[in-house]
Amino acid sequence: MKDNPRIWLWIAAAIVVINGFFPAVWILLTSFKTESELTRIPITWLPESPTLQNYVQAFTNAPILRYFLNSLIVAGGATLLCVLVSALAAYALARLRIPNKTLIFSLLVGVSMFPTVTLLLPLFEMVLALGLRNNYIALILPHAALSIPVATLVLVSFFQGIPKDLESAAMVDGCSRLGALWRIVVPLSAPGVFTASILAFVNSWDEFLLALTLMPSQAMRTLPVGIQFLQGEYSFPWPLISAALVIALVPVALVIAIFQERVVGGLTQGGVKG
């Protein structure tokens, strides 16, 4: 093994893969178990009598479909707003002569590192003042704002790689600068746009703290908050919670699986161009 360092690379890669996939696999297996089987000693790794009862209870004991729809509306709206604003900001940084661009990039990086909990109190007071509590806008706006810095940084690297001559030719033909952005630059930067969109969607879909605070009504809960309330005061129905978690993971897994090549290509190309 000392003469072949590649073995250590494979071992390290296997450890990373197992560490990353094992929790998801365990949740999936738990969702097919009963309460009695889950608490049995010794532990059974595979379900002895797989059952779909946990999934049935997830849809009947709680309004999972309503939570799912709320998450979809919030994440979809936040993604659209994030990509719209990020594209405009990235185009300005990539094409216009703006002073102190380095400072702006540093601020974007710094803002993207802000923990959500530090923004909770001012956001809560603003939402109360505007009367937006239990309103989709109360989550769409902050979710989009939290993803805009990273999305802007991703798009800037792609927009810088688009030849300016293409925009100039479009503007000579009567296209405005905004028209050149949406008709020329954005389509040619499709991998970057997909990457920014998926990052914004996943961040909004998984967000818990703001959703818990700004959407207290049961009818307006998102999936992460709704799943948290599946536990009782003295009981933790892990098979039921696991089934709900699987339901919550399906859309994200599908989106990443469908657009995997574009996302990986977007991240790599962006890193090379930056």
Image (cartoon, rainbow, N blue to C red):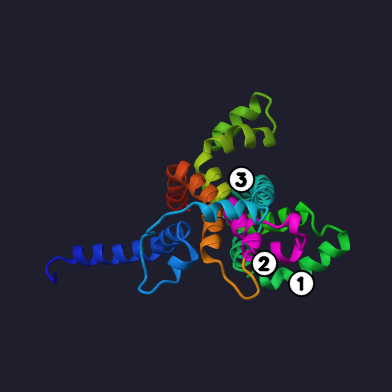
Q: State the residue in front, 245 or 30.
A: 30
Q: Earlier in the sequence, mark 1 or mark 3?
A: 3
Mark drawn on residue 209:
2
Determine the CA span between mark 1 and mark 3: 37 Å
Could you tell me residue 60's position as x and y percent? Answer: 64, 52
Asked if residue 225 lies left or right of residue 46, the reply is: right
Q: Quadrant of residue 115?
A: bottom right
Q: Secondary structure at mark 3?
A: helix
Q: Residues within 10 Å of mark 3 (few under 14, many from 20)?
A: few
Q: Which residues are magenta?
A: 201-230
Q: Badge 1: few (under 14), some or many (20 or more) residues near its Cα, within 10 Å? A: few
**Mark 1 against mark 3, which lies toward the viewer?**
1
Q: Is residue 71 visible?
A: yes
- Residue 164 in picture, x, y percent from top left: 56, 37
Q: Helix or strand or loop: what does disc 1 sit on?
A: helix
Please name which of the two marks, 2 or 3, marks the residue nearer to the observer: 2
Question: Residue beneath label 1, please?
Answer: 121
Task: Answer whether residue 249 is magenta in the image.
Answer: no
Q: Report the residue at 63% width, 64% height from top.
A: 230
Of the 4 image quadrants, the one containing the N terminus is: bottom left
- Asked whether 196 or 94 is in front, the reply is 196
Is residue 215 rendered magenta in the image? yes
Residue 211 x/y as whole percent = 70, 61
Name the residue type under label 2. Leu
Please tell me whether the stretch drawn in magenta is mainly helix, strand or loop: helix
